[in-house]
Structure formats: C-alpha cells, structure tokens
Amino acid sequence: MELHELTLKEQLEGLKSSSFTSVELTEHYLKRIKKIDPEINSYITITEDLALSQAKEADTRYNNKNPLDLDGIPIAHKDIFCTENILTTCGSKMLSDFIAPYSSTVVSKFIEKGTVMLGKTNMDEFAMGSSNETSYFGAVKNPWNKEYVPGGSSGGSAACVAAGLAPAATATDTGGSIRQPAALCGLTGIKPTYGRVSRYGMIAFASSLDQGGVLTRSAEDAAILMNVMSGYDPKDSTSLNVEVPDFSQEIGKPISGLKIGIPIELFEQDMPDYVRKNTNEAIDIFKELGAEIKEISFPNIDLSLPVYYVLAPAECSANLSRYDGVRYGYRCEDPKDIEDLYMRTREEGFGSEVKRRILIGTYALSAGFYDAYYLKAQKCRQLIANDFSEAFNSVDVILSPTTPGTSFKAGEKTNDPIEMYLQDIFTIPANLAGLPGISFPCGNHKDLPLGLQLVGNSLEEGKLLMAAHHFQQTTNWHKDMPKV
Amino acid sequence: MSLSDKELKEIAYLARINIDKKDFPALKAELDQILNLFDKLNSADTDKVEAMSHPLNLSQPTRKDVVTEPDQRSKLQASAPLVKSGLFIVPKVIEGEN
C-alpha cells in the first residue's frame, strides 16, 4: 500500500510508530502533486519549501518524543483561508496578487497542532459556484472522470483529497460548498453548526451562512480534524462560546435507537431512479444498524432556493464592496477619476458569476425592493428554521441525498445559472437554519460517486459523525479511490 | 419581472460595476431568470413571522474599548496597489489647486 492510500488516522499512527517520517510522507505528496495535478488543477499554490521545513520540524519533535497532536500530517487549505505571507486568492483575479498579512484562526490552529501545509486549493471565485468552473485560475477536474466537474465551491479541496494529493483539506460551505463536492468526489465532508468554527480570516461571502469545515476520506478523519478546528474565538463575534466534545470519542457511541427523519416532501420530488434506489438502500443499512426511521414533514422546503438566492447575494453585495482597488487587490490601469477607478476595477477584477450575484443582491437591497425581497426572504428563512425545530422534536438527524445526481460534464450547466443553483437544493436548508450537515459516499452510478446527507440539530456534529462512522464500518464506498 | 435597461444601469452604478452596453441583453435575461425564482416567496404567508437575520439568536458580545491590535501599517499596505508616504493614493477627488 502506498502512503497516499492510508487515511489520515493511519498516517498519524505510522508517524507515531516511526513506520515513516513526515518528510517522507510530505515528499510523497509533493511528488504526486507535481505529476498529477497539472491535469486536475486542484492547487492554486503549492507551498513546497514551507511544507518541507514544517515536516522536518515535526520529525525533530518525534525524535525528541514530544510530538504535537497532528504532528507531521500534510494538509491542504482552501484558498479562502488567509495564510500569513502566502498568496491567498479566493479564486479571483481581484486577489490574484494578494499576500495575506495574517493567518485565519482555522489555519493557525492547524499549524499549532503540527500539520504540514502542502498548499492552497482551487475554488469557485469567492466561493460562488457549484462546479469549480468560475475560478480565475481555471476549472478543476473530477479525478473520477476528467470530463466531469468536482463540484464547488470547494472543488479544489475535494479533487485533491479524492486524487490522493492530500489526506484531507479544509473547505467552506455557504449553501453546500463542502457537502456537494464531497458527494461528487466520493468523500466525507462536514459543515459544522454556524459559529462552531471561527470565521476569522476566512474571506467572507455571505456572513450569516458561511461556515468552515473539512473534506476527508472517512468520518473518523473528519472527527480528528473537527477536534482541531472547533472552538470559541474572541476574534469572531459570531463564534459560539460553548464546550466542544471530543469528536473522536463521539463517533464510537452506539447508533441503535438513533431516530432518522425522512422528509416526505423531498422524496415526492422528481429525482433520477438511481438516486432514489441508492438512498433507499442507505436507509436499509441504517435500519440494519439499529436506527429508527421516521417520516417527517417539511412544508416550507420549496422556499429554500429563492430565500438563499435573495439572502446570499444581498450579503455578498455588501461584503464584496471592500474590493475597491484602493487598499488591496487588483486596480484597473490609468483610472481617470475615483468613480472610474471603482467601476473599472470591479468590472475587470470580478468574474461573471460574482458580478451577477452582486447585482442581484444590490437590487434586492435597493430602496423600493427591500421589503418585497430581502425582508420577505428573511421571514421565509424563519419558516424554514421552524420546520427544522419541529422536526427535531421527533428525530435526531434528517436524511436525504446530498445532490440531485452524480457529477455532470464540464460546461454542461455554465450557461444556465438556475440549473447550476439547483445543485444545492438539498444542502441549502441547513445553511439557512445554521445547522450542521455531513455528506458521505453511499454508492456510485456509471463509475461516479453518490453522496448521502445527514443534517443534525444545532451543535450535534457528534451524532452526524457517529452515524456516518457506523455506516462506514459496514460499507466500503468511502474506501474507493479513482485511478489517476 | 423583467429589468429595464435603465434599472440595470442604476443597479450597476449602485454596485460600482461598469457594464458594457453590448452585454446588457444577455445579462438582463440571466438576472430576470433569477428574479423570477423569487416569485415563489409570495406564496408564503409571513404575516405573523419575525424576520430571521441570523441563525444564532444570541446577543453580540462586547469588549472594552481599548486598542488591541499592534501598528502594522507597512505590512498591511504591502498589498495596496499604490502607496506613498504611508498613504493610499487615488485619483484626485477634491477640486482646487494642483
């Protein structure tokens, strides 16, 4: 077995038992990245020198018998997380030269635990997209079939882990950007409860929806990384000051008696036969494991997509006003006055999907439309949150497919924004209610992976990881790796 | 719902994004499609519903009004497009002598 075929947990055991060194492990990944990534395009920046020096330091600590918790484990970071003195682009021309002056809390926490940074991963521009085709640095390919997309916006993080170019990667999720690429690339991806993971230094898209998480090859690995990322951060005013359980312990809890809710409205919708069949098979596996299945109702689920596409663009139009060509980032050539500087900098620096969303958001917030769109959407958001509260009175977690189907071909949906937005129809509700969600592999169709989603009540990531872990004890879908 | 050229021009100005006139028809069609998606919201009865602005119903924490960040002017300005004597340089905005 080659080193990249080991899970993160197995690599940690290997490092602890001196089966290999962090330098060997890191060099193995760097070599694979150089060989394989030119075609997949999952990395925007490869931090080779930094990685090797961090690996050497980790090995020294192992030799001195005082290693850190995750000492010597290589990891990739989505290029939305600021990394001090390292290029941080957010997939945009606007930040194509931006060297972050500080590190995000998430990245700092990983450094403190001894991880090795392999590089920064490709993503849809400013995390807006579901196919990783909107990146200024080029589209990312799905390692399972290079004609297909890896999903987005964390498409680079997903593709690099699926291709064995990192054992795990950080990611972010505003409407499905961790779970949808996890499903399309055959990975485990968790979006924690809003406020569980600090957003400090995570470039903002829609601040009431954005949440950092991870993409891994098993629920066990996700639990290890959730232990590192989670926790209160005074630098983020929306960070939750609550106790964080040991997720590696949580996953070992019994599954018997877990109440799994199936939203009837969702299964009444049109979906491909293979998705329905696969989801039903997954439900049967949970039944065999001792979980209880219960039908639940989500009367307002249809409102999720329109609510999201009012609120996320509204918040993005405000957040992205900071890119003005003055303090950092791209600036147009020879501006004739200050207006021209703003207008052309933003015309030339943003890609078309980002501009589309800024315009929609500006419209929804403009005088005369604020009540009809923005305020109305906020009220509908409350209705959706109420549906969840009602459901969690009788169930522990809610099950659905992660996506309406397997991956799609590159270019297939780029000319139809609504078709692309429908990719996130099952994942958006959790973001609106601020709830944790997980996606993990539950089968495949025509050699492309399929994902299953569980959404939990606030702060109950432990239950999601536990259920996924039990599922992965009796299935092997998560062990499949594409031939690259 | 469909946007007029005038409306699109106004929104683009509010958003400070220059848009080439030749891109108007295609962009308007795309935006109309998205705005039509919003019609669905009208079907929801929200008369007695409070607006939800945030997933956490917590009050915002406060801190003492003291300086916590060190002075890092030159480091923070290193990524700026144009800086002179520690100031961000932009085209002239105040009329008067040169």
Image (cartoon, rainbow, N blue to C red):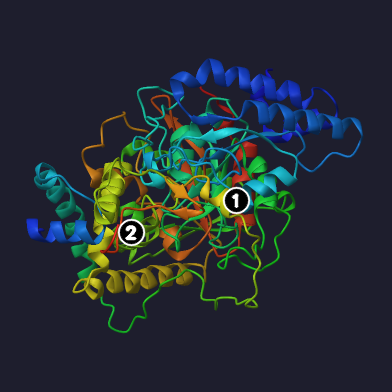
Please indicate, yes or no, whether residue A402 appears anywhere in the rendered image: no
Foreground residue among B38 and A392? B38
Can you name the residue that lies furthest to the top here? A35
Q: Report the residue at 32% width, 62% height from top.
A: A314
How many angstroms separate mark 2 from mark 1 (CA)? 22 Å
Q: Position of residue A247 (x, y in %)?
A: 70, 52
Which residue is label 2 attached to? A317
Q: Report the residue at 65% width, 74% height from top.
A: B66
> Element at badge 2?
helix
**Is the residue A319 above or below the residue A39 in the image?**
below
**Is the residue A213 above or below the residue A64 in the image?**
below
Residue A376 relative to residue A87: left or right: left
Residue A250 relative to residue A372: left or right: right
Q: Where is residue A91 in the image (x, y as percent from the top left)?
A: 42, 39
Name the kind of residue labelled 2 in the image: Ser
Q: Report the residue at 40% width, 31% height from top.
A: A137
> Element at badge 1?
loop
Instruction: Evaluate if marks 2 and 1 touch, with contact meaning CB atoms under 8 Å apart.
Output: no
